[in-house]
Amino acid sequence: MAVKKWTAADVTEKILNKENLFILDVRNVSDFEDWKIEGENFDYLNVPYFELLDGVEEIKAKLPSGREILIVCAKEGSSMLVADMLDEEGIDTAYLSGGMKSWSEHLHQTKVYEDEKIKVYQFVRVGKGCLSYMVVSDDEALIIDPARFVDQYMEAAKAEGANITHIVDSHLHADHISGGKELADATGGSYYLMKSEGAVFDFNPFEDHEKIVFKDIELEVLAVKTPGHTPGSVSFFVNKKLLFSGDTIFVSGLGRPDLGNKVREWANDLYNTVYTKVSEIADDVIVLPSHYADFDTELNEDGYIGDTLGNIRTRNEKMFTASREAFLDDVEKSASSVKPPNFEEIIMINRGVQDADRARKQELEIGPNRCAVHHTD
C-alpha cells in the first residue's frame, strides 16, 4: 500500500465540498492549539511526533476506520515518517505535502463577479484568512491587496489575456507580507498606497489619486478614505457595484484598530468611517474584504467570501447602530485579543525599511489571521 501525498489544493477542495476528514497533527500541542487546518466536517487527533518515535501502536485505536486520514506536520518530514509507520500497520493514510508551510501559502482562485465591463476573481489564502483580488477589463488587470506569491497573479492575468497594469494595497498589512511592490517591479504596473502609511520606496500615493481609471471602458476605482484599521486604510469602490473594503468592513465585523497602540483614537476614526462614508453606500453593493475570520460561515453560496452591504448591516446591526461611546467601548474591549505575531517586523518589511529572504518571510507569516477579530454579536 503506497502512502498518498496530498497538496494544499487537495485539502482546500475537501473543505469547499464539506467532506469528512480525520487529521492526525503531529506538531507540538501549542502549535496545534494556536493554528490548524479547519474544515466543517474535520476531526482531529494531536499527538506530537516525538511521542511516536518508538512506534504508532498506542494511537492505532484512536484512528477511525473507513475515513480518510491526513497526517500533518510543520514541513512534511515528520508526517511522512508517521505515514510510513501507519502504512506498515496496514492503515491507509496520506500526508500533507510541504506541511503547514504549504498550507499557509496556498491561494485558491474563484470567480466573484462578471458583467459586460469587468470580471473579478478572489484569491483565498485559506491557511491565513487573507483575501486578494484581480479585476480584469479587456486586456488589463488590477490586483488588489496581493500576497507575496506574485507569479500566481501573473499567471492568472495571462490566462485572461490581460496585463497587470495597476496594483493597489488598501493599507500597510500587519499579518502578511505584501506582494505589491514586487508585482509592480515584475510587471511594470503602477503601484498605489497611502503616503501616510510610511513606505520608503517609490509608489503612487492615493492622496494624489482620488480615482484610478484605466481602459476606455468605465472601470472606475475610487479610493474611499476609510481610516480605522491603520491611519492610512482605504477601500476601493469599483463601478459603484463592488466595495473592496480592505480591513475596514468584514462579512462578520469590522477591522481591529489597535495595532498602532492608539486604539481609542483609531476606533473613533473607524466610527466616523462607518457612520459617514459607509452609511452613504447602497445596500445592494457587494462588499469584498481583505480578510475573513471563519471560512465556513463567511463563504457564501456562490463560493466566495463576501456579501451585500445590506446583509452585513443586518448581521452586524449592533455595530452599525451603536452610539459613539458604546462603539468605542466595544472596540476597546476587542483590542485585548492576541495581535498578529511578528506584526512589527512585517510592517517594517512592507514599508521597505527592512528586507527578508523567502525563508524568513515564511517564518514570519506562519500562524492564523488575527486582523479580522473584531466581531459583533
Image: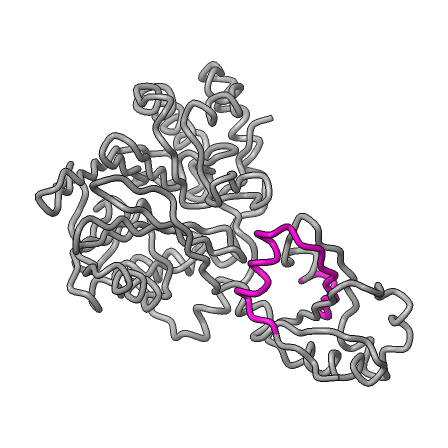
User: Does residue 327 appear left or right of residue 356 in this picture?
Assistant: right
Q: Residue at x 78, y 63 (%)?
A: 67
Is residue 305 magenta-colored?
A: no
* Residue name at image x 33 percent, y 39 percent: 244
Q: Quadrant of the C terminus?
A: top right
Q: Nearer the viewer, residue 265 or 183?
A: 183
Q: How many marks?
A: 0
Position of the N terminus, as image quadrant, is bottom right
Residue 346 is left or right of residue 15, and the answer is left
Q: Is residue 30 left or right of residue 234?
A: right
Q: Which image quarter: residue 165? A: bottom left
In the picture as drawn, the residue positioned furthest to the front comes out as 116
User: Vertically, is 41 above or below 274?
Assistant: below
Residue range corresponding to the magenta coloring: 6-31
Residue drawn at 41 percent across, 41 percent down: 289
- Percent from the top left, x then y, of residue 41? 70, 50
